Amino acid sequence: MTNSSEASQPAPASTPSLLPEEPALPKGYTLHSGYPPVPDYLHLRAAAGLSPKTPAQAAPVARNSWYGCYVTYTPPDSPDSETTASASPASNSSSSSPTIVAMGRIIADGGWYFHVTDMAVLPAHQRRGLGGAVLRHLLARIRTHAPRGEGGVGGAYVTLFADAPGRRLYARNGFVETAPGQVGMMMPMGWEGR
């Protein structure tokens, strides 16, 4: 585990570090600390049904996030499946290379406010517990690295925007709807006037 000062420094996409306390995943899946390379990030968002983004929008994700993780898949019958689990994942370059199949990240101030975002699992790999493993791993990171509240002052405030398919997952992991007391609001900025 890294100390809290390292938590704000994202791992470079090309050299992810494996975490010692990985959640249990099905055979062939490996959880990594860090962020997918931009092409994989863009593909995963679009394929999982999240709004598509451009390479310019994706480029600052790793350096401006508080923490992230992703899951790779190597077919268990692959000749090098045992050795690729600790190697740097490649982007679908061959059938035996690890494929990035899930991700999630946290945008935060590192003090009290943490926003979970980019929760995505490729459709062919859904319903295998990957989204839950990524979410629990992100929440564990907040629990171990966020400053604790003292003297009646609250601890971490963790938010996310839940689309319909993700609501059950988030509810199972302790999230509750805030409406009607609070509602999420957004301002779409298309930059048409630039």
Image: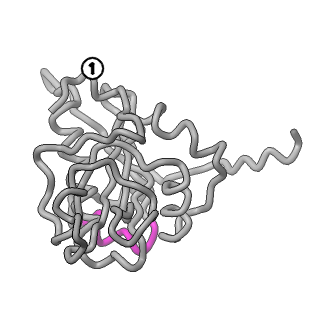
Going 36% across and 62% down the picture, which residue do you hit? Answer: 102
The structure residue drawn at horizontal position 41% and vertical position 41%, both measured from the top left corner, is 14
Q: Is 4 placed above or below 176 here?
A: above
Give the answer, above or below, for where 113 lies relative to 120.
above
Tell me which segment is drawn in magenta: 163-171
As drawn, is 113 to the left or to the right of 182? left
Question: Residue type at mark 1?
Answer: Ser
Number of callouts: 1
Q: Quadrant of the C terminus?
A: top right
Tell which of 17 and 113 is nearer to you.
17
> Label 1, on which residue?
5
Secondary structure mainly formed by the magenta segment: helix
Residue depicted at x 48% and y 32%: 64
Residue 5, percent from left and from top: 27, 20
- Tell me where residue 83 appears, x and y as whole percent: 19, 57
Q: Residue at x 48, y 70 (%)?
A: 48
